[in-house]
Amino acid sequence: MNIQESVIGIDLGGTKILIGEVTKGGEILGAKSYASNTENQTKAVEVLLNALDDYTQNIGFIAEKQVGIGVGLVGRVDYKSGIWLEIEPGKTNPIPLAEILNVKTGLSVSLGNDVVCATMAEKQFGWGRETNDFIYLNVGTGLAAGFVVEGRITQGGHFNAGEIGHTVIDIHSDISCGCGRRGCIERLASGLGIKEEALRHLKDYPKSVLAKNQAELTGKMVLHAAEEKDELSGKIIDNAALQLANLIMNMVRTTDPECVILGGGVTRNEHFFQKILDNLQSNTIRFVTKGVVRSKLEKDKVGLIGAAVIGMNLGNEGGKE
């Protein structure tokens, strides 16, 4: 295999770090997953650097030359200055990660928020090839979005755009959110939110199949149980699908997208995806001409590809050396 150039992609998530080598055409030449530690940013960076050493020494690179590094990170990222600002609210310790990696490797380095990176992957290699105006909605453990308008992604004055998981969709809810409000959609319709909803209501449904394994309960298990007609699971999934549909219909009023792309593991469930579509009102989404669709990209690799995309410096996103 004679490949001239590649980019190193690093996707740092809450439970794992995925490091890989990616071509400018989006092909993953190699990748390895490592356990992450997001107790704090200092520890997370230490683990990341050790993982990069292992990848470099024990996996190695296929292309003759690596032209840059792109890093997708949980939390808030100042991509202009190459600084990882905070891992989550209340855990703030600004770290000049782009500079640290540049000194270590000699390569140019770009940083981005993880959902921003996934949006950039979609822009470069997915539905973004068909439209310059779309919303990428990631429904995984948490919930966030990327907004692309006229080909450019919006990140905001404080690099906090797209945190729509903290949109209140139930003003009468007594469910508290870490943001300080109640009734946020992330607490009801993300993977974690679906799991927490099940645990909250299990006492009222002692015959639910979910009661058999509460200690290991996951959102995926609730989705599967809903398919099997479990009463509690069905109610939770019905409500989550309705609220996600409401969120989508609210979002399309803000940027007038041609397409809404659903990413993340939760919306890969066909039963759940169809319920979301069933709750959309045709008049509200009449200008979403390319539809509410699922990502074309592999959910476990989209963050890595997106990190590589910002490392390629193909758009306005990216940190500095």
Image (cartoon, rainbow, N blue to C red):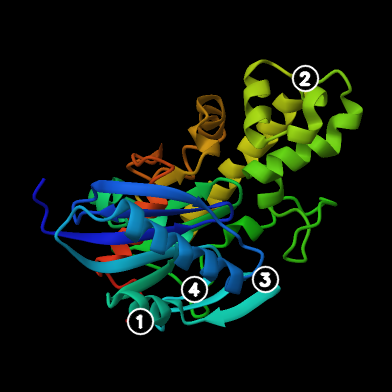
Q: CA distance from mark 2 to mark 4?
A: 41 Å
Give x and y (percent) for residue 286. Answer: 41, 43
Mark 3 and mark 1 residues within 8 Å of each other at the beta carbon: no
Give x and y (percent) for residue 308. Answer: 31, 60
Mark 1 and mark 4 residues within 8 Å of each other at the beta carbon: no
Nearer to us of marks 2 and 1 is 1
- The residue most toward the front is 57
Q: CA distance from mark 3 to mark 4?
A: 12 Å
Residue lying at 70% horizontally and 45% vertically, measured from the top left: 193
Circle 1: element type: helix
Q: CA distance from mark 1 to mark 4?
A: 19 Å
| Residue matched to label 2 | 209
Asked whether residue 255 appears in the rendered view, the answer is no
State left or right for residue 54 relative to residue 182. left
State left or right for residue 182 relative to residue 165. right
Mark 2 and mark 3 residues within 8 Å of each other at the beta carbon: no
Nearer to us of marks 3 and 1 is 1
Residue lying at 62% horizontally and 32% vertically, measured from the top left: 220
Quarter residue 242 falls in: top right
**Residue 84 or residue 67, whichever sits in front:** 67
Categorize mark 4 by other alpha carbons within 10 Å: few (<14), some (14-19), many (20+).
Answer: many
> Which is nearer the N-term, disc 2 or disc 3?
3
Residue lying at 45% horizontally and 48% vertically, measured from the top left: 33
Q: CA distance from mark 3 to mark 1?
A: 28 Å
Mark 2 and mark 1 residues within 8 Å of each other at the beta carbon: no
Circle 3: element type: loop
| Residue matched to label 1 | 103
Q: Amino acid at mark 2?
A: Val
Question: Looking at the rendered structure, which numbered label has been put on residue 89?
Answer: 3
Q: Amino acid at mark 4?
A: Val
| Residue matched to label 4 | 77
